């Protein structure tokens, strides 16, 4: 090729690094121009004066102007700062090296145990498992908690919600499930919670044992975007191990903080608020996350527990209501049982597992139905029994419920450091329901 032609060809192309320019900043949104971007593109903002850097995501486009939600705080940035497109996109490093580690949503270690070597980059956002590729939930998934294994039996690939008010004991129950679960891999996402709860959860609830466990943390002082995508990043880690053919336990605390993060982002972008101030995007985001859990044909499974904070113990909260409609069951923790000293305080009558009837034996199901019936009778006649208005012998079934009251409460109670296997739980339930007297 002649030199002049080569020179003309090179000069016709722009080989410099393209960058945009910040034109406006407020507390939650950076407005910029000068780059050709798409929704969900990752960008890097660099301060001209201090060389300070932060990552952000394109969340809205208006003609030549685009809006960035930053992953950190905006202090120190100003108009005229440069904006670069990040070619890596929304990908995180995943691999076996994550096991036993505590990381942030970008998989950067925060446990001071050194760097983490990864073997694969995985996108944070993925489509959920296709409906026709989902495997049937037909295997029992034991969590080592008697009241769940015996009365609300879970299946491999099931999605359950743990609904609780503040201070009722959901963190303790989470720790019991992680320690007692039979899953070979455990992924825990702590989203939007207080910073002090992270070491507390590891030391008190898990006993400092992180074997085969990955903990992804985005605390309440992190930006809304970090809290939002921390949940998606944790699910991507679980999917990596599921794709290896492994059964994964996924626990997230809490869905409510995740939805609140999207509420902050949505309202800052001008979305209309609906019930309790949540914009429509907060509700549509929940199935995008929750439906990624499950059992996939030819691969492993993700059995997921999502905690939902119900303010004032109000089960009609929009996030609680939406979550309950998506999940395959719900475990409700009762403040009343806490006051009576029953831990974990699982309200059996208000809780349900939608797949239990398909995975347990007929005999087990009969025991569960009998337990619930006797416990319901006790609750309905509690006042009469307490004031001595009920005369024994009037109702044989209520008499049986009264005889077994202590045994049923003992079955529902369990020390936080004790785990039971599924067969022992079933034997105890059978013995309790088969006996005539305690």
Image: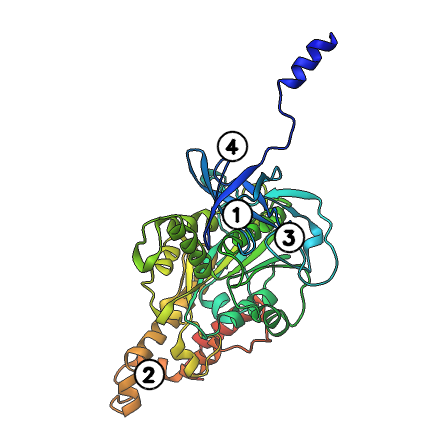
User: Which residue occupies 30% across, 57% down?
Assistant: 275
Q: Can you give x and y, in whole percent of width and height, for residue 238 in the image?
A: 59, 51
Could you give the CA–CA distance between mark 4 and mark 2, rounded to whole angstroms?
Answer: 75 Å
Nearest to the eye among marks 4 and 2: give it: 4
Q: Which type of secondary structure does the marked residue at label 4 adopt?
A: loop
- Quadrant position of the N terminus in the picture: top right
Residue extending farthest top = 2
Q: Quadrant of residue 421?
A: bottom right
Nearest to the eye among marks 4 and 1: give it: 4
Nearest to the eye among marks 1 and 3: give it: 3
Nearest to the eye among marks 4 and 3: give it: 4
| Residue placed under numbered mark 4 in the picture | 36
| Residue placed under numbered mark 2 in the picture | 399
Q: Along the line of sight, which residue is nearer the eye, 268 or 185?
A: 268
- Quadrant position of the C terminus in the picture: bottom left
The crowd level at tag 1 (other Cα within 10 Å; few <14, some 14-19, many 20+) is: many
Residue 107: numbered disc: 3
Q: Earlier in the sequence, mark 4 or mark 1?
A: 4
């Amino acid at each position: 090729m002649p030199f002049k032609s080569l020179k003309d060809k090179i000069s016709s192309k722009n080989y410099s690094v393209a960058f945009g320019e910040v034109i406006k900043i407020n507390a939650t949104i950076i407005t910029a121009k000068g780059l050709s971007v798409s929704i969900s593109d990752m960008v890097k903002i660099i301060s001209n004066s201090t060389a300070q850097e932060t990552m952000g995501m394109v969340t809205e486009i208006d003609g030549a102007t685009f809006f960035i939600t930053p992953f950190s705080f905006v202090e120190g940035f100003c108009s005229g700062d440069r904006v670069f497109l990040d070619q890596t996109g929304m990908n995180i490093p995943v691999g076996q090296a994550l096991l036993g580690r505590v990381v942030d949503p970008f998989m950067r270690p925060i446990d001071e145990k050194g760097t983490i070597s990864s073997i694969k980059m995985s996108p944070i956002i993925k489509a959920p498992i296709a409906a026709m590729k989902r495997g049937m939930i037909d295997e029992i998934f034991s969590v080592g908690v008697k009241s769940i294994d015996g009365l609300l039996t879970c299946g491999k690939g099931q999605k359950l919600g743990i609904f609780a008010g503040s201070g009722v004991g959901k963190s303790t129950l989470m720790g019991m499930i992680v320690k007692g679960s039979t899953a070979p891999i455990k992924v825990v996402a702590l989203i939007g919670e207080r910073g002090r709860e992270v070491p507390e959860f590891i030391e008190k609830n898990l006993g400092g044992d992180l074997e085969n466990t990955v903990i992804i943390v985005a605390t309440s002082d992190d930006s809304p975007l970090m809290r939002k995508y921390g949940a998606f990043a944790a699910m991507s880690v679980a999917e990596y191990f599921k794709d290896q053919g492994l059964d994964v336990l996924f626990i997230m605390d809490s869905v409510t903080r995740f939805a609140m993060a999207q509420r902050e982002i949505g309202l800052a972008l001008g979305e209309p608020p609906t019930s309790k101030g949540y914009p429509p995007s907060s509700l549509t985001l929940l199935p995008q996350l929750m439906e990624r859990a499950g059992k996939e044909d030819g691969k492993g499974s993700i059995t997921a527990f999502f905690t939902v904070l119900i303010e004032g113990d109000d089960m009609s909260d929009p996030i609680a209501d939406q979550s309950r409609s998506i999940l395959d069951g719900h475990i409700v923790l009762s403040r009343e049982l806490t006051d009576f000293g029953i831990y974990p305080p699982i309200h059996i009558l208000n809780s349900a597992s939608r797949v239990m009837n398909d995975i347990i034996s007929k005999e087990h199901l009969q025991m569960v139905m009998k337990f619930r019936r006797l416990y319901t009778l006790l609750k309905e006649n509690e006042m009469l029994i307490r004031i001595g208005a009920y005369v024994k012998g009037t109702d044989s079934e209520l008499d049986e419920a009264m005889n077994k009251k202590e045994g049923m409460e003992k079955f529902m109670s369990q020390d936080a450091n004790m785990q039971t296997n599924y067969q022992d739980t079933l034997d105890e339930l059978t013995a309790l329901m088969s006996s005539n007297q305690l």
